[in-house]
Amino acid sequence: MVALLFSALFLLPAGGAERDFRPLERKAEELRGLRFTRPVPILVVDGAGMRKVLADQIRKEYPEGEWPAMEKTLKAFSMIPPKMNLRAVMNGLLEEQVVGLYDPYEKKLFVTNAPMADSNLLSGLGMEGFQIGDVYILHEMVHALTDQRFDLLSLPIQDKENEDRASAARCVVEGDATWGMMRYLYDTLKVPAESRGQLDDVMFGMNMGRELMGTSIPAYLQENLLVAYLAGQALVKMAYERGGFEGVNRLYKNPPQSMEQVLHPEKYFSGSDRPVGIRLLPPKAFGAPGWKELGSGVWGEFNTRIILQEWGIPEEQARKASEGWGGDAYKVFEGPGGALAFAWATVWDTDSDAAEFAGACSKAKELSVIREGTRVTLTKGAPSAVAKKAA
């Protein structure tokens, strides 16, 4: 719901307008074990130009009419504040962060020439001429390269009926580009191979990128903007360790079906624990005058954890309670006076997993929790009669 294809979310410049990008193209081919089939148009734009590119990309992914329902859905689940303007916050956040973007619709790569005092950050290390922004251009190069070879828009990255499945596919795309980007940086810095994994762990353990967003950005937006880069790279690295470049290529041919398979890669590689599809019928009471369905979808394990935390469940308990996720489906409704309500059905791997999730949810306010074996159904914001019939 909040991802943007395929942008580099870093506050650093791309470099000057007069550039020969062919060395970076060749480096992207080397790091990824693939060859470009045709040249990639690269357009260097100023800050205003990048903002226009970004606005056009957002309109392609999220048409005007979709924003109200998205915003109300997040508010119904208490994932953003009641008075937040989702579109304004997202536009502002991305405008501040995006310095490079590959457009898979137009097959063009845009980079900004916005100046920055520290653009030659590594010159003090005897690396005059190297611009740290090149690292992020290479990130976008990998997007262009894999798009030519695998057609990124053929992946379920825009599955708006199943956000969980879309997020898992985005982890492949962004994780691959981040994996290449980090290896390019380590090569430039001449970091020994045995130290690179440890450096990855340190950087990601420091919540790389979160400090750029500030504490005012809700966890749902922060976490979903970053997970594709962080968890995605871990999945891609494991695929490479198991099968080399062809192992990474297989991620595009057979992408993970859920964020559970990304967060627990062993489930993806073993082919086990595929997500369970759930059919959630709208409770009849929502057919009453003044009520309408706003939307539906699938949250998945990752967003389930975030939801629990937003409901006041401690982080570690929320993480444990969201593990064992088997499948889910939700529907959001709007009633008289703009009242928001939801019905959310979940299925868990075991009775114990379901009991743990139900127990965590029981601590949330104004939430009806009904458990039947491995199925737990939640309702909130609706008449009591609705909650009884939801299961």
Image: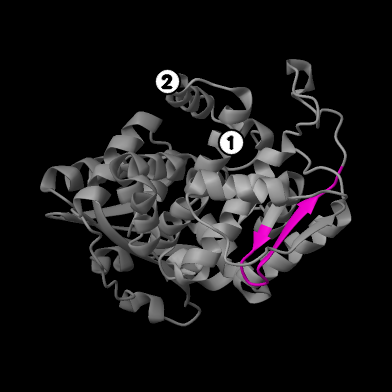
**Residue 201 coordinates in the image, percent (x, y):** 45, 25
Mark 2 and 1 residues: CB-CB less than 8 Å, in contact? no
Is disc 1 surrounded by few (<14), some (14 to 19) or many (20+) residues within 10 Å? many
Q: Residue at x 36, y 43 (%)?
A: 240
**Is 11 rendered above or below residue 267?**
above
Most foreground residue, 234 or 86: 234
Is disc 2 surrounded by few (<14), some (14 to 19) or many (20+) residues within 10 Å? few
Q: Residue at x 57, y 28 (%)?
A: 186
**Is 163 rendered above or below residue 113?**
below
Q: What's the residue type where badge 1 is placed?
A: Tyr
Can residue 9 be seen in this snapshot?
Answer: no
Residue that lies at the very extreme toward the top in this rendered image: 125
Would residue 37 be found to the left or right of residue 260 on screen? right
When asked about the image quadrant of residue 185, the answer is top right
Query: In the image, which residues are magenta?
Result: 102-114
**Residue 160 coordinates in the image, percent (x, y):** 47, 69
Which residue is tagged 1? 184
Q: Quadrant of the C terminus?
A: bottom left
Which residue is tagged 2? 194
Secondary structure state at the residue bearing disc 2 = helix
Secondary structure state at the residue bearing disc 1 = helix
Most foreground residue, 186 or 321: 186
Would residue 360 be found to the left or right of residue 237 on screen? left
Q: CA distance from mark 2 to mark 1?
A: 15 Å
Q: Is residue 109 magenta?
A: yes
Q: Residue at x 36, y 59 (%)?
A: 255
Q: What's the residue type where badge 2 is placed?
A: Glu
Would residue 204 be found to the left or right of residue 111 on screen? left
**Is 85 rendered above or below residue 238?**
below
